Image (cartoon, grey):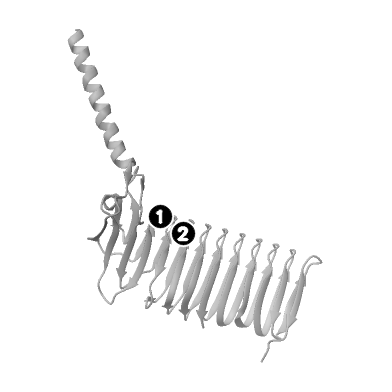
Amino acid sequence: MWTKRFLFLLIMVAGIGVASAETLSMRGVKGNGRMQREQRQVGRFDRIVSLGSMDVRVQQSPSAQGVVVEAEANVLPLVETMVRGGVLTIKYKSGSSFSTRRGVRITVTTPVLRSAELRGSGDLHFARGFRQPSLEVSLAGSGDVSFADAAIDGDLLVNVKGSGDVEGQVMTGGNVRITLLGSGDVSLSLGRPQSVGASLNGSGDVNLRGETLHAVLSSAGSGDISCRQLTARRAEVTFRGSGDGELSVIERLDIRLTGSSDFVCYGKPAIGEHQVSRSASFRTVPRKP
């Protein structure tokens, strides 16, 4: 009887020891400083979701698709890259926790990319020469998104819900829609898009540059929409919050300020609809030749 109980206790202790060792192997990893590079075999994808602290670089390729992971040798196995339903998901293994001396870098090569979503603290960078028919970028973490002389022939959609920033140069030929709900900032040079829409409902700022036929700016937050270097032929502006704004307009401006905002229009457009509350201010400033 006592022998059976003793054996049972030994088995239980051994089991706990194995489980503890597995937990430590997952949770107690410290980067060894030796960087390794690994080419991952993945299926076809046209969307990316990044969920961790790794930095992701996206580069254009005429036909090839691939994923390269660079990390310290003992951290590399903790980085997962998987494709399901055309979505490439980049994340760390569930339950893993580690410290790294040199960070984790992911290089994604693809001919086609429809959307990219960043939910972690890592950054997402679109390399020089990146060009797509259209693109949707979503940011819900603290990481930043940057463009280095990219080109989007059609529509560009940018959604920011976190504290990270979106910046850079991306030449667009279609419609640009920017939605900012967090504390992150958006600063983009856009070239000559057909239309530009910017909606702000957070504390972050929006700064846009370029030329467009039609601009629609709306704000219900405390952040500013600073678009002095964005020139629109026609524009509609609706501000209900405390954030300020500015825009260059050539032909016609409809403006509604029902909060405490200050708005400056650069140029001498015809003023269409005009509604400015007592706590708000609106003025036009001639553009310098």
Mark 1 vs mark 2, CA separation in Å: 8 Å
Q: Bin the neighbour count of mark 2 within 10 Å (Cα to Cα): few under 14, some 14-19, many 20 and up.
A: many
Write the residue at 57% across / 72% down: 197
- The relative height of residue 281 versus residue 17 in the rendered view (above or below) is below
Q: Which mark is residue 143?
A: 2
- Asked which quadrant contains residue 262, the reply is bottom right
Which residue is situated farthest in the top direction here? 1
Which residue is situated farthest in the bottom direction here? 289
Residue 81, image x and y in percent? 29, 56
Write the residue at 29% across / 75% down: 61
Residue 23, image x and y in percent? 31, 36
Q: Which mark is residue 265?
A: none
Q: Nearer the viewer, residue 245 or 219?
A: 245
- Asked which quadrant contains residue 25, the reply is top left
Q: Nearer the viewer, residue 16 or 75?
A: 75
Q: Quadrant of the N terminus?
A: top left
Secondary structure category for the residue under label 1? loop
| Residue 27 horizontal side relative to residue 194, left or right | left
| Residue type at numbered disc 2 | Gly
Q: Earlier in the sequence, mark 1 or mark 2?
A: 1
Q: Bin the neighbour count of mark 1 within 10 Å (Cα to Cα): few under 14, some 14-19, many 20 and up.
A: many
- Answer yes or no: do the residues labelled 1 and 2 have beta carbons within 8 Å? yes
Write the residue at 41% across / 67% down: 125
| Residue 262 horizontal side relative to residue 55, left or right | right
| Residue type at numbered disc 1 | Ser
Secondary structure category for the residue under label 2? loop
- Asked which quadrant contains residue 114, the reply is bottom left
Q: Quadrant of the C terminus?
A: bottom right
Q: Which residue is mark 1?
A: 53
